[in-house]
């Protein structure tokens, strides 16, 4: 009989466990040996599994010295020598027959979590396919001098009644080969299921290939001594690989490092970085794999506050990230510490780890942990509560250079597709209201109000949807500078309830990790920003159906307050003309959505999306969407574009300011009144064009464009925060 469920018993496995084929001699011996049930609250070290006090772990030389010293003293009473035993924790794998099991045992060693987990693969001929994952969140550990037994009930990604896992591992000394682990499944009522004998594979729970590339002029980080500055935890020298090794992940450097030959004044844009990842990551594939790319870069157009970026586009989920050295390039202890932090933090996002203060947006949601001493917290956001000091100094003084326990459980034991690069996107969302932190607070004394509105107010299908976000300050306090209210910085989260019945917690395809830029806002001050929210890393095109969409947002203030916005709705009209249908077909693709997100791109990997924008602009100039396509094309023309070649050299396309102004002028002139794109986007277009002229040395034209933007903003009674940003 063909078994389609891996935990069910195979033919021939219905015998009692100690007589089944594949059960080893240690298992049979265990059935005649007394079993000692360990205290669940006791430490889970390998030595601690015994009833006797733990024997110190000795090196091989120390053991031989002890034996030799006792040999030279025949008059002394013989003392039995207890050799240190191997740790049981690690990764095990069964033979590739039918179903292959990769199993992770986590009961001793460094920071044991007392968990089991595993992934099943279906083997058919020369092909192997991922089947599903399981995790045992709490285990009971029993021990004899010769055997460790671990029992618990599993959560699984598939439906099964065989949920009780019993794992047995013989205890051997460090001088003996690592033994196999045997797992036997059963139902809660005791019906026997399948048995797998898994050979020891590694002391690491997971292995990840890391490819690193380095921009010219950047000295890539190697290691930092955590004792160089005051901190929590023991002093030790840590590399990025070492930080992940402490988490139980073997990070293997592929050795495929390339030097990217940019000029000393080069500035990266999101569009150039996206193409560099797709082109230059030699191990990139359109599939899930434990392989990731890290770029060591100098500067980004968003300035010195930006420390890192993680890419999360459909089909490219969490496979690449970049760190920026501009503000941390000196070799001081503080800079080396931050380099280690930034690299580990950005790679943590690639493992699908959220910021400590954004855990409510995970699936399933968890409470935010602003007091977490974790790689995934922002030092300046550290808030332990209870009157204890917070902020950067308090964080670094207590930081033990590690993930917190819940993050560690995810990295080691999360279901495969929730962890693996190229697997599930960076969060998928659960509920719009209570479950995801978008419920109205019972008490709100924050002195802040978040308001949102959609523009255009009645878009036809295919027209880009922009969300206007306004933070209103009701009493003097620190808030984020208005540019950081854009969802790509993740201080603001947006949830969208769609007419098809699902809820999307918006995940920008490019996430920015930046130092919070805080400003003192006076009573009555308004901080507005607009953001394109039509394309999402998890679901792709968000507004791809006609109907009514309900939108809400939340803002995490510097003091940790969660400010929930009003709920607003937008109705997407169905196309009523052939032109509208053609525009919708052109713009409602993944490539077009990504090009709109990046505000244009020269990437050959997005060529179809770029062509779609050009067709809308040229063939359908009167359609409302044409202004948005011209905006993206104009911004892209106004900035240089860097293409990274396979050999590490770069090809830079210079600014075409004349073309950029021609396109952006059409957008601005059509939007000076009540029609066209929103006002904030108009000011952004003029400011971007001004910066382009300034970079080209045309100070007069740059000033004229800034003046135009400021005068227009003044005529529309924009708040002081907008006027300040326009110079």
Image (cartoon, rainbow, N blue to C red):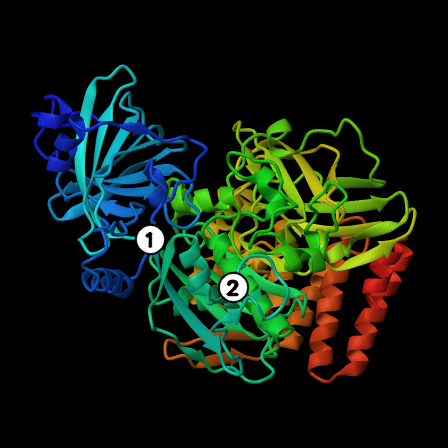
Q: Residue at x 12, y 49 (%)?
A: 126
Q: How many marks?
A: 2
User: How crowded is the residue under tag 2: few (<14 C-alpha within 10 Å), some, or many (20+)?
Assistant: many
Residue 702, relative to residue 236: is it above or below?
below
Q: Secondary structure at mark 1?
A: loop
Mark toward the start of the polypeptide (1 vs 2): 1
Residue 342, relative to residue 695: is it above or below?
above
User: How crowded is the residue under tag 1: few (<14 C-alpha within 10 Å), some, or many (20+)?
Assistant: many
Tell whether label 2 touches label 1 (CB within 8 Å): no
Quadrant in the rendering for residue 50: top left
Q: Residue at x 43, y 66 (%)?
A: 604
Q: Is residue 534 visible?
A: yes
User: Residue 43: x and y, percent?
Assistant: 43, 40
Q: Is residue 601 visible?
A: no
User: Residue 44: x and y, percent?
Assistant: 39, 40
User: Residue 595: x and y, percent?
Assistant: 53, 58
Q: Which residue extends farthest right?
A: 523
Residue with the mark numbered 2: 343
What quarter of the picture does the N terminus occupy?
top left
Q: Secondary structure at mark 2?
A: helix
Residue with the mark numbered 1: 204
Query: Does residue 694 appear to the left or right of 334 in the view shown?
Result: right
Closer-to-camera residue (448/251): 251
Q: Which residue extends farthest top?
A: 189
- How far apart marks 1 and 2 lie (CA) works out to 20 Å
The label shown at residue 317 is none
Disc 1 versus disc 2: nearer the observer: 1
User: Residue 105: x and y, percent?
Assistant: 32, 42
Q: Residue at x 60, y 73 (%)?
A: 333
Q: Residue at x 65, y 34 (%)?
A: 437
């Amino acid at each position: 009989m063909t078994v389609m469920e891996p935990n069910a018993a195979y033919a021939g496995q219905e015998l009692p466990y100690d007589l089944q084929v594949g059960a080893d001699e240690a298992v049979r011996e265990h059935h005649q040996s007394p079993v000692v049930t360990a205290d669940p609250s006791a430490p889970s070290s390998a030595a601690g599994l015994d009833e006797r006090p733990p024997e110190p772990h000795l090196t091989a030389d120390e053991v031989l010295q002890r034996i030799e010293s006792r040999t030279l003293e025949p008059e002394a009473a013989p003392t039995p020598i207890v050799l240190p035993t191997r740790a049981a924790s690690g990764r095990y794998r069964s033979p590739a027959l039918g179903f292959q099991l990769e199993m992770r045992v986590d009961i001793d060693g460094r920071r044991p979590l007392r968990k089991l987990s595993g992934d099943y693969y279906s083997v058919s001929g020369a092909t192997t396919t991922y089947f599903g994952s399981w995790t045992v969140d709490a285990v009971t550990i029993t021990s004899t001098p010769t055997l460790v037994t671990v029992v618990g009930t599993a959560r699984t990604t598939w439906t099964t009644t065989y949920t009780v896992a019993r794992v047995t591992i013989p205890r051997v000394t460090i001088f003996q080969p690592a033994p196999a682990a045997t797992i036997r499944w059963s139902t809660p009522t005791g019906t026997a299921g399948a048995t797998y004998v898994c050979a020891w594979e590694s002391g690491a729970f997971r292995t990840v290939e890391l490819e690193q590339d380095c921009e010219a002029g950047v000295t890539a980080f190697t290691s930092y001594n955590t004792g160089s500055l005051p901190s929590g935890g023991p002093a030790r020298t840590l590399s990025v690989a070492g930080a992940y090794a402490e988490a139980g992940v073997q990070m293997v450097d592929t050795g495929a490092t390339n030097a990217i030959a940019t000029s000393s004044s080069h500035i990266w844009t999101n569009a150039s970085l996206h193409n560099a990842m797709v082109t230059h990551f030699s191990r990139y594939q359109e599939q899930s794999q434990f392989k990731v790319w890290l770029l060591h870069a100098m500067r980004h157009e968003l300035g010195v506050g930006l420390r890192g970026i993680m890419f999360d586009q459909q089909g490219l989920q969490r496979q690449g990230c970049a760190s920026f050295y501009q503000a941390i390039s000196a070799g001081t202890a503080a800079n080396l510490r931050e380099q280690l932090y930034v690299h580990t933090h950005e790679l943590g996002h690639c493992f699908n780890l959220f910021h400590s203060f954004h855990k409510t947006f995970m699936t399933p949601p968890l409470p935010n942990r602003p007091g977490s001493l974790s790689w995934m917290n922002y030092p300046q956001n550290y808030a332990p509560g209870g009157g204890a000091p917070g902020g950067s100094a308090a964080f670094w003084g207590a930081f033990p250079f590690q993930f917190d326990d819940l993050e560690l459980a995810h990295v080691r034991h999360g279901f495969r597709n929730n962890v693996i690069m190229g697997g599930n996107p960076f969060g998928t969302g659960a509920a719009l209201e209570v479950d995801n932190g978008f419920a109205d607070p019972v008490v709100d004394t924050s002195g802040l109000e978040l308001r949102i509105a959609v523009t255009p107010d009645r878009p036809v299908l295919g027209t880009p949807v922009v969300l206007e976000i306004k933070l209103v300050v009701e009493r003097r306090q620190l808030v984020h500078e208005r540019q950081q209210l854009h969802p790509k910085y993740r201080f603001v989260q947006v949830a969208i309830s769609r007419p098809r019945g699902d809820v999307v917690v918006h995940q920008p395809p490019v996430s920015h990790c930046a130092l919070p830029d805080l400003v003192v806002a006076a009573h009555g001050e308004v901080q507005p920003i607009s953001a394109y929210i039509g394309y999402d890393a998890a679901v792709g095109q968000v507004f791809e159906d006609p109907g009514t969409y309900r939108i809400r947002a939340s803002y995490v203030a510097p003091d940790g307050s969660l400010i929930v916005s009003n709920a607003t709705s937008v109705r997407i009209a169905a196309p009523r003309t052939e032109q509208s249908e053609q525009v919708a077909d052109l713009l409602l693709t993944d490539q077009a959505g990504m090009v709109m997100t990046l505000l244009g791109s020269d990437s050959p990997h997005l060529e179809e999306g770029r062509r779609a924008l050009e067709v809308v602009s040229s063939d359908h100039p009167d359609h409302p969407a044409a202004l948005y396509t011209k905006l993206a094309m104009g911004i892209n023309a106004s900035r240089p574009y860097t293409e990274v070649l396979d050999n590490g050299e770069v090809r830079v396309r210079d600014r075409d300011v004349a073309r950029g102004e021609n396109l952006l002028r059409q957008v601005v002139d059509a939007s000076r009144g009540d029609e066209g794109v929103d006002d904030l986007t108009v000011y952004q277009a003029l400011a971007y064009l001004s910066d382009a002229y300034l970079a080209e040395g045309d100070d007069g034209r740059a000033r004229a464009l800034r003046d135009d933007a400021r005068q227009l903003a003044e005529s529309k009674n924009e708040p002081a925060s907008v006027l300040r940003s326009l110079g």
